[in-house]
């Protein structure tokens, strides 16, 4: 009797659990840590934004970075720090790799009064640029605060939605796992009965 691939996979996992349980769980733990590390590195370096650009400008990491950037800018500008210095400090403090690269260039361009015309200006939303530039050339601190609150609320809504969906995804994952095991266990019986008939 030739066992189908799902059954072979379940048998292999069972043999590993029986014969080498420490090695099996160690391998699973190392694989989970490696995946976690890769995801953290991907998020830290903002590779989604750097690879896909404006197609992913609305992802949660970028929205959170905009909330942090605008909030820090509002606080720094309200205490009298110049726009270039505020941009540099706020950019470095938001812990988003892409913004940390964009903010120094934007700060250098702000020294010569060309924030809106900066080559990196397209990396920030138009409403943030409008708040930094202001109607009369002075930054609109109140608008920056409101933008920070708006982006923060958007991130909280996304977190609440994703948290509420965890249970549904867990049920689906358990269902798929149980279905795979059932198919793996019963498919040899189906093959055997078909061969006998």
Image (cartoon, rainbow, N blue to C red):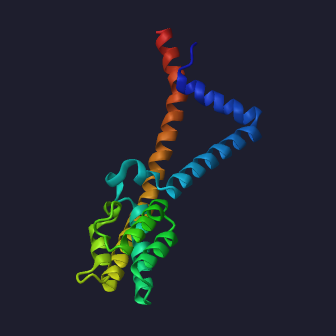
Task: Decide if residue 139 is on the left or right side of residue 16.
Answer: left
Inspect this view and state whether residue 137 appears: yes
Residue 140 against residue 49 in the figure, above or below: below
The residue located at (30%, 83%) in the rendering is 140
Outermost residue toward the front in this view? 112
Image x and y of residue 102, in percent: 42, 63
Q: Is residue 160 visible?
A: no
Front-most of 57 and 134? 134
Q: Position of residue 144 (x, y in %)?
A: 34, 80
Q: Quadrant of residue 26?
A: top right
Give the mark count: 0
**x and y percent of residue 174 in the render?**
50, 46
Q: Residue furthest bottom?
A: 79
Q: Position of residue 51 (x, y in %)?
A: 41, 48
- Looking at the image, residue 83 lies above or below residue 56: below
In front of the other: 21 or 100:
100
Q: If the image is split into quadrants, where does the N terminus sit? A: top right
Residue 59, above or below 13:
below
Q: 9 or 47, which lies in front?
A: 47
**Residue at 39% across / 79% down in the picture?**
83
Tell me where residue 54 sits by quadrant: bottom left
Q: Residue at x 58, y 51 (%)?
A: 36
x 46%, y 70%: residue: 91
């Amino acid at each position: 009797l030739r066992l189908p691939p799902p059954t072979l996979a379940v048998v292999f996992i069972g043999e590993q659990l029986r014969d080498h349980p420490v090695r099996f769980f160690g391998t699973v733990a190392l694989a989970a840590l490696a995946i976690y590390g890769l995801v953290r590195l991907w998020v830290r370096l903002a590779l989604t934004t750097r690879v896909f650009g404006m197609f992913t400008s609305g992802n949660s990491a970028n929205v959170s970075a905009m909330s942090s950037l605008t909030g820090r800018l509002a606080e720094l500008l309200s205490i009298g720090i110049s726009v270039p210095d505020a941009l540099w400090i706020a950019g470095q403090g938001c812990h988003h790799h892409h913004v940390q690269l964009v903010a120094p260039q934007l700060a250098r361009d702000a020294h010569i009064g060309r924030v809106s015309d900066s080559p990196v200006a397209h990396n920030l939303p138009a409403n943030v640029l409008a708040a930094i530039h202001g109607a009369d050339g002075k930054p609109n601190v109140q608008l920056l605060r409101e933008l920070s609150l708006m982006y923060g609320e958007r991130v909280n809504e996304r977190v609440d939605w994703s948290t509420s969906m965890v249970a549904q995804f867990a049920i689906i994952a358990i269902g798929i796992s149980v279905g795979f095991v059932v198919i793996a266990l019963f498919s040899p019986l189906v093959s055997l009965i078909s061969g006998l008939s």
